[in-house]
């Protein structure tokens, strides 16, 4: 049954779900779908600003992403990607079930989609908790004391790669991240020895003091040499907190949209029990599906940009 046939022309009978200001169910459906596409366009503009910020900072400070993305759990990110892809499939099947009037399948597919959303947010909560516990927070909340302690623990478990941090005037970035070598060249050491630099903007006072202490006493530790007044150990960029600001902004806004989508799906689950949706009326299911697909699509971009490259 075609889309136009399923909605009818509205001249033979007035459908109970047809608003009085529409001439037909078909007109009501097409207007609602157009309105949702316009709304999705504004959502693309909203996320587009964040993606612009991502690429601007990546072009100017590539070391942030080279170092920072190793702090993200790629396994959890990949699992979340699979979860959302499955939810897209089940949402599409839910739309089809509403079009053919299969109420049981509609309820089952909506329930699976909702559970996938719960799984996604649960995994994201696990990731966020790990970042909070280890001090990887945005802006002034970034805690160098916790991150240095966490990375030193990583060095303790990775002793085989721990002995050559000072070869040829270069500090190597290894340890808990498993990152490729990120180096701070010798001229930086020479400049820093002449006059320690001030802490970068955006760091808390405690974070600046911790970094300064490591710079002052780093050579006494025998493991990590401080290069200036704020450069952390292992060649970590001093403005790494910017990466986590972008990470939390983009993934946090996306998470809010997932929650909104879950609320819509929960509402569809409740109202579909009375047989409201069928071949003649499935507009809310299709419009809700469009929103959910956008949420999934945004994550498809966020995962490789933040976690993989």
Image (cartoon, rainbow, N blue to C red):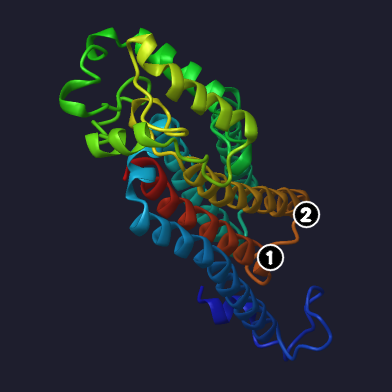
Name the residue tied to disc 1. Answer: 284
- Viewer-proximal residue among 81 and 128: 128
Q: Residue at x 62, y 68 (%)?
A: 279
- Tag 1, which secondary structure? helix
Q: Is residue 290 above or below residue 306?
A: below
Quadrant in the rendering for residue 97: bottom right
Q: Residue at x 50, y 67 (%)?
A: 48
Q: Where residue 60 sits: x, y (%)? A: 36, 57
Q: Is residue 292 above or below residue 147?
A: below
Q: CA distance from mark 2 to mark 1?
A: 10 Å
- Tag 2, which secondary structure? helix
- Can residue 39 be seen here? The reply is yes
Q: Where residue 121 sits: x, y (%)? A: 60, 37
- For residue 186, which numbered disc appears in the image? none
Left or right of 298: which side holds 176? left
Left or right of 81: which side holds 261? right
Name the residue tied to disc 2. Answer: 271
Location of the C terminus (image quadrant): top left
- Viewer-proximal residue among 170 and 133: 170
Q: Where residue 249 sits: x, y (%)? A: 58, 50
Q: Residue at x 43, y 19 (%)?
A: 151
Q: Return the disc, 2 or 1, that comes first in the chain's sequence.
A: 2
- Viewer-proximal residue among 167 and 78: 167
Q: Residue at x 36, y 47 (%)?
A: 304
């Amino acid at each position: 049954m075609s889309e136009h046939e399923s909605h009818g022309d509205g001249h033979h009978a007035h459908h109970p779900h047809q608003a009085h200001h529409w001439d037909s169910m078909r007109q009501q459906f097409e207007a609602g779908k157009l309105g949702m596409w316009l709304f999705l366009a504004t959502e693309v503009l909203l996320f587009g600003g964040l993606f612009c910020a991502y690429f601007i900072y990546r072009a100017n400070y590539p070391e942030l992403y080279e170092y920072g993305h190793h702090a993200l759990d790629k396994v959890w990110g990949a699992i979340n990607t699979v979860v959302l892809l499955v939810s897209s499939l089940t949402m599409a099947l839910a739309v089809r079930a509403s079009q053919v009037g299969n109420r049981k399948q509609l309820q089952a597919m909506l329930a699976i989609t909702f559970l996938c959303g719960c799984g996604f947010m649960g995994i994201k909560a696990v990731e966020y908790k790990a970042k909070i516990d280890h001090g990887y927070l945005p802006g002034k909340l970034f805690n160098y004391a916790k991150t240095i302690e966490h990375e030193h623990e990583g060095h303790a478990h990775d002793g085989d790669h721990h002995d050559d941090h000072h070869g040829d005037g270069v500090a190597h970035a290894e340890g808990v991240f498993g990152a490729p070598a990120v180096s701070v060249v010798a001229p930086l050491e020479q400049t820093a020895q002449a006059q320690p630099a001030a802490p970068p903007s955006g760091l808390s006072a405690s974070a600046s003091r911790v970094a300064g202490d490591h710079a002052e006493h780093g050579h006494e530790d025998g493991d990590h040499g401080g290069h200036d007044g704020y450069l952390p150990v292992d060649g970590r960029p001093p403005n790494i907190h910017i990466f986590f600001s972008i990470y939390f902004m983009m993934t946090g806004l996306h998470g809010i949209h997932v929650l909104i989508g879950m609320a819509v799906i929960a509402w569809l689950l409740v109202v579909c029990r009375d047989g409201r949706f069928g071949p003649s009326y499935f507009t809310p299911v299709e419009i809700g599906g469009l929103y959910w697909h956008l949420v999934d699509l945004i994550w498809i971009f966020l995962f490789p940009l933040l976690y993989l490259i």
